[in-house]
Amino acid sequence: QPVEATDDAFWDQFWADTATSVQDVFALVPAAEIRAVREESPSNLATLCYKAVEKLVQGAESGWHTEKERQIILNCCRLLTRILPYIFEDPDWRGFFWSTVPGAGRGGGDEDDENARPLAESLLLAVTDLLFCPDFTVQSHRRSTVDTAEDIHSIDSCEYIWEAGVGFAHSPQPNYIHDLNRTELLKLLLTCFSEAMYLPPSSDSSNTNPWVQFFCSTENRHALPLFTSLLNVVCAYDPVGYGIPYNHLLFSDYREPLVEEAAQVLIVTLDYDSSTSSSPTVDGTTTGTAMDDVDPPGPDNLFVNYLSRIHREEDFQFILKGVARLLSNPLVQTYLPNSAKKIQFHQELLVLFWKLCDFNKKFLFFVLKSSDVLDILVPILYFLNDARADQSRVGLMHIGVFILLLLSGERNFGVRLNKPYSVRVPMDIPVFTGTHADLLIIVFHKIITSGHQRLQPLFDCLLTIVVNVSPYLKSLSMVAANKLLHLLEAFSTTWFLFSAVQNHHLVFFLLEVFNNIIQYQFDGNSNLVYAVIRKRNVFHQLANLPTDSQAIQKGLQRRKRTPEPISRTNSQEGVSMEGSRPAAPAEPGTLKTSLVATPGIDKLTEKSQVSEDGTMRSLEPESLQSSPGGNPPSAVSDGELWSGEASHPRRDRRRLSSASSSGQWTPTPDWVMSWKSKLPLQTIMRLLQVLVPQVEKICIDKGLTDESEILKFLQHGTLVGLLPVPHPILIRKYQANSGTAMWFRTYMWGVIYLRNVDPPIWYDTDVKLFEIQRV
């Protein structure tokens, strides 16, 4: 039966107990009981929520606490963290926190002005006040405790930022009690924001989360110091701990849970669809003096606004160094295994890095300005290679590839890849001597030939990245050159070309890579030229691809005999690096969350042309004309244009290249002709025409079987004046779109759901944003 709100003795028992942890609260308040109260005595659940928020508000108001009051604040925090997901999962309750509570139990309406605030707002404001509460979550600056009561509202929280870094130079004394209290409050914030998990993914990614919207608005007077505190705590964290090996085994690290929580709260507050609004970035012309310069009208979300306005070099340096340090932490292979603490929040860091580059173009340019970008690249390639066989880590594969796609749209990225690769991170890839470009190509080859089948939608993206950097690659190693040719060989088999409507795009991408290198970087690339000459039959077969119905049918028959998605034969694998473990599939029973489909590469990118002086101009998308032969416009109308996406609903694109077996689409001679005639083979054919006779002559004259002589000849050879006029360089730059914004939202919340297991905040509640699946 309903209990009166005024019955303090009854309600106080929920938070008065002194020795509890958040785990205890979860054990004492089982899910079934919360749901039963919600269904059978809703007024009690409402009163409980209201009372718990009231306690937090009082705690925030008083500003100075006894030990007992602190315990009450923490217990209310834990209780709300426990209950909120059950409020969100029931659509009838979802508006509850946004309604204003009648004056019941307010003690005679002495605070009428406050009665108008929705409960959610009171809760968020109380939590933010508590995050800067002296002697609770921050060091008190004053020694005497007199007169502090009315001071909590006059506190300038910018003086209490949690960690040195962006916009703050002073590093406070570490205090593990404060860290623990902050962590509990942030956990509650994250739970408030998690209402997003209970709404199904919608194509309209602009529907904002009301909790995040209020929290990141000017109503939150601590928005700036809180943003800065979260960012600095994450970027300043060093899990190795003062260089003493094994020190994480000696003492418990109170900072790490805080850093994880801070990273998760940060990425959720930055969940903002930049494609629907004008970009929040300040262009290079605005002269900002500090982050709080109010000239450029940024988005209403202050966190996105602040992030987009960071501009001091030393701030960029601090952020980049911090993110790179944390991302490379799992790779740190010292001579003492386990000597460094291994962090688990690399996925949150990748989302944060993505947001930084997407919302702050100055940061992106800073990252690419020096070879520091390679400290981000190598860990990403490590994660991609490591996760390629693991179904539960498809999301990690996607975000890694998205970041590389974003970086590859800038010329500097391609240039940086020429730096020799000397760091020997153990990875199960063939041993090679070469540059970071070789590493990238070898890892991509490994993903394509030995990843699991759900990665097929990423092939377009992987090859787009290689095309984007190819004009700048000064000299590929023999290993990488062979890998590229092996991919061409695999993708140009007739069954692969004829078995799905967009498979031939992969061949176009690879030919574009070869053309870019031959036209713009011929001099240093004798290994690639040699590999092209050795595999010349692949190019001749492509030029003579049969187009009659009989040949098409025969090509498709061949597929039934070779079930492998891509043959791994003819790829000289060689020995893997020492100390590496093969990429493992997911353990059976591993939980994973579903993701929405990502947009096709044509939606993800827009084409830009690089002019002589290196500047880029955007190319207007050409209109799709029907190709001759009466094909629908969805067939390729330009070797670059993407066929089939218009005629194929999104969900089919998720399936494998064998989607045709369901009989929706069959290849026709007209269709093959429509793109075969556009294969850009001229440059390569000319190269073969000139060089093959010369190489054969050398072999006959000197009786050579040794490739080093041929390579020497190719190094000194030249094709100046013999090749067709160089084509303009085309770069496909990532462009923000609501499809990826929605993908990021489902991915981010999926990660947060799976990572919060102790206590399991959302486990077993009726989440709608994604499905939880077992591998």
Image (cartoon, rainbow, N blue to C red):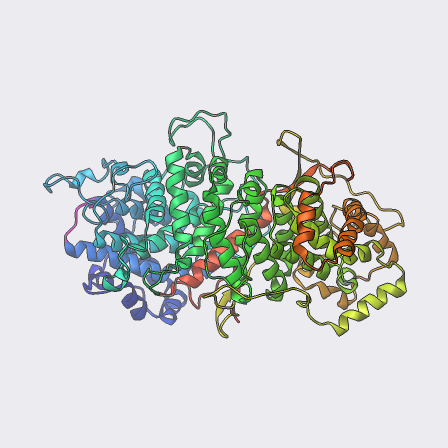
Tell me what residue is drawn at x 71 percent, y 57 percent: 488
Q: Is residue 517 visible?
A: yes
Tell me what residue is drawn at x 30 percent, y 39 percent: 113
Task: Read off the magenta span.
Answer: 62-66
Q: Is residue 69 left or right of residue 76?
A: left
Q: Is residue 502 visible?
A: no
Magenta stretch, overall SS:
loop
Q: Is residue 273 left or right of residue 166?
A: right
Callout count: 0
Q: Quadrant of residue 26?
A: bottom left
Q: Nearer the viewer, residue 339 or 588?
A: 339
Q: With respect to residue 690, does 442 lie above or below?
A: below
Q: Position of residue 418 (x, y in %)?
A: 55, 44
Q: Position of residue 262 (x, y in %)?
A: 36, 51
Q: Nearer the viewer, residue 502 or 224?
A: 502
Q: Nearer the viewer, residue 402 or 476?
A: 476
Q: With respect to residue 283, does 246 lie above or below?
A: below
Q: With respect to residue 156, does 466 lie above or below?
A: below
Q: With respect to residue 27, does 118 lie above or below?
A: above
Q: Quadrant of residue 732?
A: top right
